Image (spheres, rainbow, N blue to C red):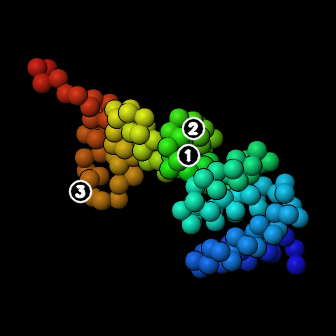
Amino acid sequence: MSIHNEISRAVLLRTDGQHTEALAILLDLLKMAPGDAGLHFEIACTYDAQGLPADAIPHYEQALAVGLDGQHRRDALLGLGSSYRSMEQYADAVRTLERGIAEFPQAHEYAVFLAMALHNLGDHRRALQLLLKHVAEHSADPQTAKYRRALFHYAENLDPHYDEM
């Protein structure tokens, strides 16, 4: 069997909730292919699925260092940023998520995770701005969508000056 077939089998097991079995396969493969970016990525995802961000981080970092592209890179940057945040490494989370936004400007999911990391750093203003803009741009709720312009305005003007109203 090829390494990619085995990785696919492990991903199916992980998707089915069989994390221990998936991880066993992936870690065995790592002995044969320690420099495989996709393998490191899948190991990181498997650790994340088990709620083990400290174990996921070095594999996300290795996968990105070795070289991922496309959807896997997009997912790895988000996973790494989220894992950093879970481990209270907020500055690393912000840096990683901002890198993801720069590389994947169409990836709107980054804004939500970045807002949480900014909140953890005490930058509540920027966090709320990101969330308001995200809701304004992406809400499918028609009652919220009809206030899109107002939400964009409030995102830039969080503190109304009542004497100017």
| Residue tagged 3 | 143
- Give how far across and how far down residue 41 sits, in percent: 70, 58
Above or below — where is 125 with respect to 113? above
Q: Element type at marker 1?
A: helix
- The answer to whether residue 152 is left or right of residue 37 is left
| Residue tagged 1 | 84
- Give how far across and how far down residue 64 sits, in percent: 72, 47
Check whether the beta carbons of the residues at disc 1 and disc 2 lie within 8 A of each other. yes
Disc number lying in front (3 or 1): 1
Three-letter amino acid code of the residue under disc 2: Asp
- Give how far across and how far down residue 130 sits, in percent: 40, 40
Q: Residue at x 53, y 47 (%)?
A: 87
Three-letter amino acid code of the residue under disc 1: Tyr
Q: Residue at x 23, y 28 (%)?
A: 159
Asked whether residue 126 is in view, the answer is: no
Q: Residue at x 56, y 46 (%)?
A: 84
Looking at the figure, which quarter contains the N terminus?
Answer: bottom right
Asked whether residue 89 is in view, the answer is: yes
Disc number lying in front (2 or 3): 2
Q: Element type at marker 2?
A: helix
Residue at mark 1 to residue at mark 2: CA–CA distance? 6 Å
- Looking at the rendered structure, which numbered label has been put on residue 45? none
Residue at mark 3 to residue at mark 1: CA–CA distance? 35 Å
| Residue tagged 2 | 92
- Give how far across and how far down residue 132 sits, in percent: 33, 43
- The answer to whether residue 99 is left or right of residue 163 is right
Pick whichever of labels 2 and 3 is earlier in the sequence. Answer: 2
Pick whichever of labels 3 and 1 is earlier in the sequence. Answer: 1
